[in-house]
Amino acid sequence: MKKIVLVLFVGLLGFSLTAQETGAKIEFTAETVDYGEVVKGADGVRVFEFTNTGSAPLVLSKVTSSCGCTIPSYDKDPVLPGKKGKISVKYDTKRVGPIRKAITVLSNADTPTKVLKIKGEVKDPNNGTK
């Protein structure tokens, strides 16, 4: 009797672990984008690429930034398993100084919240330094 209960328990445990592994999974190529040194007024658009490595469609429900100077945009369509997607981020390069911003991604992935980062520095060529 104990062996039967043990076998059932192990079987249920294995089934529940398998059930948790199914679903959407998001893997970014890089979670930080370094702008490096950019000139004031330069193109401030950068792209975060990701892949759905899970077994269900991945849906991004919300993508927000830590301030109004950084505007993220993304495709609202589900990303099928094995397919790639992207999140574009536009930083206002008219603001001179260091760039240190966070972009929060909410989705139906196994890790529902991901924080991406951008960094760099905007320099004013007319000023010599900043």
Image (cartoon, rainbow, N blue to C red):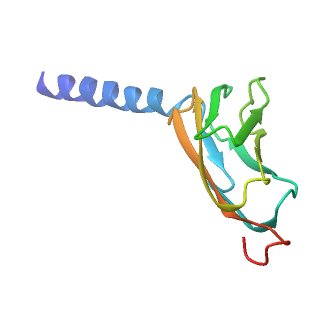
Instruction: Out of 14 and 93, give the one closest to the viewer.
Output: 93
Front-most of residues 36 and 88: 36
Q: Position of residue 29 (x, y in %)?
A: 69, 54
Task: Please tell me how many numbered marks the rendered image carries.
Answer: 0
Asked if one can make out residue 58 in the rendered structure from this viewpoint, the answer is yes
Which residue appears at 77% of the width and 38% of the height? 83
Q: Is residue 55 visible?
A: no
Location of residue 75 by image quarter:
top right
Q: Residue furthest left?
A: 2
Q: Is residue 8 above or below residue 28?
A: above
Quarter of the rendering containing residue 78? top right
Residue 117 x, y percent position in the rendering: 60, 52
The outermost residue toward the front is: 127
Looking at the image, is 81 positioned above or below residue 119?
above
Q: Is 28 placed above or below 21 here?
A: below
Instruction: Name the foreground residue: 130 vs 45.
Output: 130
- In which quadrant of the rendered view does residue 60 lie? top right
**Residue at left offset 77%, top offset 48%:** 92
Q: Is residue 54 left or right of residue 123?
A: left
Position of the N terminus by quadrant: top left
Q: In the drawing, does residue 27 fall left or right of residue 45? A: left
Q: Residue at x 77, y 34 (%)?
A: 73
Q: The C terminus is located in which quarter?
A: bottom right
